[in-house]
Every structure is written in structure tokens, then in C-alpha cells.
Amino acid sequence: MDATGHTEQENVGDREPVLDVVDRVCESCFGLFMALTFVGTVSAVGAGADAGHKMFYTALGCNLAWGLADAVMFLVRTLVARGRRVTLAHSVRGQPNAAAGVRTLRDAMAAWLRPLIGDTELESIRRRLGARPDLPQRAVFVRDDFTAAAAIFVLVVAATFPVALPFVLFANVPTALIVSRVLTIAMLFGSGMALGHYAGFRGWQAGLAMAAVGVLLTVAIIALGG
């Protein structure tokens, strides 16, 4: 898929993942925190034999709704961003001369990138845009967009189970609460390690930092009545 969202014929082995590491980890963390919010209010569910099941289904329902909303907003964000790129491409092609086209490209660049790319490189991009016969007239969805949206939904919903499933597996709610929080912190540590490796930080330090965020959040939830 190119910058405008046009899909070219390519080898299966050359295809990029529909979600990068940051997307996958962050969506999982969003699901964890959403589930943790409901798990933290377990004392409000009340006593009874079905308290754990109520907690599980409440957290699952929350993340089903959040996963759906997040997936839909991903599609909206993707289409808007792609539409902006298509509009820019047509704007560059419609300029009366090369200098104006280069200026349009430079104005659209991020501020930190402008000093790194000269007019020669931008002119090369402008010429390639002008030579493309397959530039779409408007932004459209492609198959990978829906695959990515489905992956987001699955990641958010799947994050419910390590946090909420102990309330189904353990009859004693306080025990289930401890197991749930331990699993949550362990998953946050793993998520932090993944982000740390991706960003070039020390994995264990990033893992500890993310786990610390989880501990602080858990303490805050308990203090607020969880």
C-alpha cells in the first residue's frame, strides 16, 4: 500500500503487518486498563455466589463496546488521513509549475523533517506523482483497513480475560482480585518490554516503568473505592 492507500501487486512475504508493535501493545494496554477499571470496583458488585460472574461479564461487556468503538474510530482516522494524502497529491499535480509543486510538498511536511530534505528530493517526488497513472480520485478503504480494525477489536476484547477470568475461576472474590491484579501487572511488564525494545530502550527498564504505572493505577482505583 502506498502513501495514498493504493494497493500494488506485491509478494506475500513483502507485506507489512496491518498493525505495528506500538499499535498492538497500546491496544492491549487500553483493554487492560478498561477491564482493570471494572475489576477495581469489584467491591461495589456486592457479595453473593454470582459476584465473580457479574464482574467478568461486566468487564467483558465494557471491552466489547470499547473494542468496537476503537475499531470504528481507527477506520475513520485511517480514511481521513488517507484522504488528506490524496488531496495533497492532487494539489501537487495541479500546481502551475515545478517550484509551486515543491513548495506545496514542503509546506505539508512536518517541521522537523523540512531541514533534512532538499528541493532536489522534493522535485523527484513531484515528478513521480505527476507520472503516476493510477492516482485515486478520492480516498477509499482497502482490505487491510478492515483487517486492522478487526485486530484492534480482538486485542481489546482479549485483554479482558487475564484480568476478569479469575473471577470466574476462583469462588473467593478477594483471591480472584489478587490473581487478577498480579496478571495485569505481569502483562503490563511484558507490554513495557515490547515497547522498550521497539523504541531502543532497555526492555526490562521499560517493563518496570509500565508495571509501575499499573501499580499506581491499581492503588488509585483502590483508594477511590475499588
Image: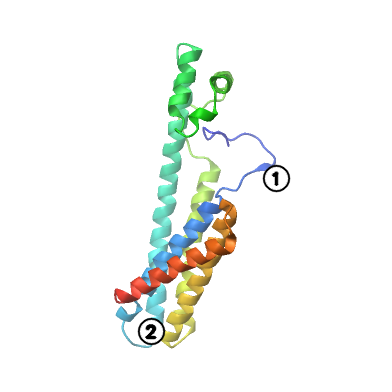
Q: Is residue 32 above or below residue 53?
A: above
Residue at image position (38%, 76%) is: 55
- Residue 57 appears anywhere in the view: yes
Q: Using the image as rendered, state which of residue 148 and residue 105 is in the foreground.
A: 105
Residue ID for mark 2: 50
Residue at image position (50%, 32%) is: 113
Q: Quadrant of residue 41?
A: bottom left
Mark 2 packing: few (<14 Cα in 10 Å), some, or many (20+)? some
Q: What's under tag 2, amino acid-wise? A: Asp
Residue at image position (70%, 40%) is: 11
Q: What's under tag 1, amino acid-wise? A: Gly
Quadrant position of the C terminus in the picture: bottom left
Please give left or right for residue 32 compared with residue 41 in the image: right
Please give left or right for residue 61 compared with residue 89 in the image: left
Q: SS class of the residue under badge 2?
A: loop
Residue at image position (45%, 74%) is: 164
Q: Is residue 43 above or below residue 121?
A: below
- Residue 155 percent coordinates (x, y): 50, 60
Q: Is residue 46 above or below residue 4?
A: below
Residue ID for mark 1: 13
Quadrant position of the N terminus in the picture: top right
